[in-house]
Image (spheres, rainbow, N blue to C red):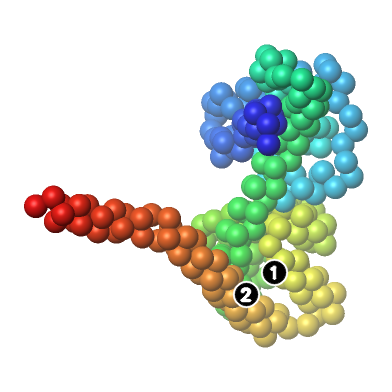
Amino acid sequence: MTPAVLLAAAAGMLAGTGLGEVAAARRGRRRPAGARAVAALVALGRRLGAPAPARDLAGRLEAAGRPFGLGPGEMTAVKGACACVALLAGAPLAASLPGRLPVVAFPALGLAGFFGPELVLARRARARRRSMELDLPDLLDLLRVAVEAGLPLGRALAEVGHRHTGMLAREWRVAAAQVQLGVPREEALSALVRRCPAPGVALLAAALARAERHGAPLGETLAAQAREARAERARRIREHAARAAPKIQLAVALLLVPSVLLLVAAALVASLMV
């Protein structure tokens, strides 16, 4: 791994991380500095002539929560601008490399800058998925109680969304508001699935659509999905714990064991010098 390639990766990541650092600040009235930087990247990318967006880019943006409200075309413009910024930032060091390394370093800089925002999107989507998977069982139980109490489905989604915090509850509130504004329920549920990358949300949307189409009772279905979501959450916790054990052993082997050996060696040296 040459220094130029390392610089390329670092420059690309630094150029892309501005997409996710202050996305939550969009709720405020004042435009944050990160939003201004992303707007400048969009303008630069459009001037450079960004390529056409990929077909699945819109879905990945929805799964990531649409940081800064970026659309597919704007995201592609940001990627092109990040490639330009990474290339300009790393050009001096890449040009100073010996031999033919600059021939490899310059394309690596551009590719790292271009794909850096994609890595940020993937990281945000994974974080949203983990958060939603943690909240899903409790929300399903609350929805089951609301439906069994006689509330209409749209009203039940809105009530559960208002009485619970978290990303998933917020998306439920959005879906309920869309239904109340006249958006067809099937379209609102499809948009909900795109915005929520957790697999259990797709199962929930299918159950809600089936209940609306055939009049099937929802209580038992929601209870079963809540049990499955809890079992899946417990399985993921066990997997994380299992992956943590080798890391702890590595820390013990690299840090604790050498420190103990140093203490023993110091004691031996002190006893020999007496």
**Residue density around tag 2, few if under 14, some if 14–19, many if 20 or more, within 10 Å:** some
Q: Which element carries disc 1, helix, strand or loop?
A: helix
Q: Is residue 51 above or below residue 270?
A: above
Q: Residue at x 55, y 26 (%)?
A: 32
Residue 25 located left or right of residue 97: left
Q: Residue at x 36, y 60 (%)?
A: 257
The quadrant holding residue 168 is: bottom right
The quadrant holding residue 150 is: bottom right
Circle 1 residue: 200
* Circle 1: residue type: Gly
Q: Residue at x 43, y 55 (%)?
A: 254
Residue 32 located left or right of residue 225: left
C-alpha distance separating marks 1 and 2: 10 Å
Question: Quick one: label 1 or label 2, which is nearer the N terminus?
Answer: 1
Circle 2 residue: 232
Q: Which element carries disc 2, helix, strand or loop?
A: helix
Looking at the rendering, in which quadrant would you find the N terminus? top right
